[in-house]
Image (cartoon, grey):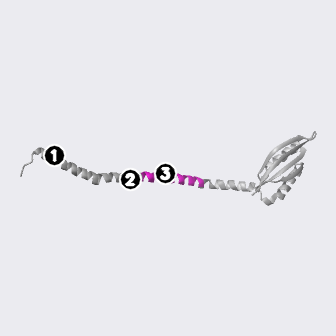
Amino acid sequence: MKKQNPISKTIFSTIGIILITSTIGFVIILPSINYIKNIKKEIQTIEKESADQYQKIKLMKKSIAELDTVREKSKLIEQALVDKNDAVKIIQELEDLAINKKIEQSLSINSGTDNSFVFSFKTKSNFSNTIQYLNSLEHLPFYMIIDNLSWTKVDKENVSLTFQATVFAK
């Protein structure tokens, strides 16, 4: 057997070590690195989903906390609406109010929508009674939108007021 010189022995040993190290790197270390990267991506995805879920839960809790307030307000709105079949009752209430406030009133119903009545008012009385009448209209137990107030002086003591009012129905 021929003795190898120390330089070739060192070269072969170095090549052997490099091959073994490369094999270990490709077989064990590289897949482990990829596995760790995948785990990192999954963790980030789970963190994002958890944060989104937390925000949704936070909004849900806020909504649930405000639910009672919304119910109370919707009850108030419901009370402010009149029943579609109550047109005669509303007219009677408006006529009684005019009599109480000493107002001469001409009242008619115009065509409204399915969810409202449109009333046309023409009143005559002194200014003070007319203002009190308008104030009383504001305090009726149903919601009324008053449009197009038109004031006219009739004589020394009286004014005429013409306007339209929309009353919403359920």
Amino acid found under the numbered disc labelled 2: Asn
Could you say where residue 122 lies in the image, as x and y percent from the top left?
88, 47
| Residue type (three-letter) at the residue carrying disc 1 | Ile
Residues at marks 3 and 1, CA–CA distance in whole angstroms: 56 Å
Q: Residue at x 72, y 54 (%)?
A: 77
Instruction: Determine whether, in the image, residue 150 is placed left or right of residue 32.
Output: right
Q: Is 48 a magenta residue?
A: yes
Q: Which residues are magenta?
A: 42-63
Q: Amino acid at mark 3?
A: Ala
Reading the image, the residue beneath label 2 is 38
Q: Is residue 27 magenta?
A: no
Residue 56, image x, y percentages: 54, 53
Query: What residue is disc 3 on?
Result: 51
Q: Are marks 2 and 3 in contact (CB under 8 Å)?
A: no
Q: Which SS class for mark 3?
A: helix
Badge 2 vs badge 1, beta-carbon distance below 8 Å:
no
> Label 1 belongs to which residue?
11
Determine whether the residue tagged by mark 1 lies in a helix, strand or loop. helix
Question: Of residues 40 and 57, which is closer to you in this image?
Answer: 40
Q: Earlier in the sequence, mark 2 or mark 3?
A: 2
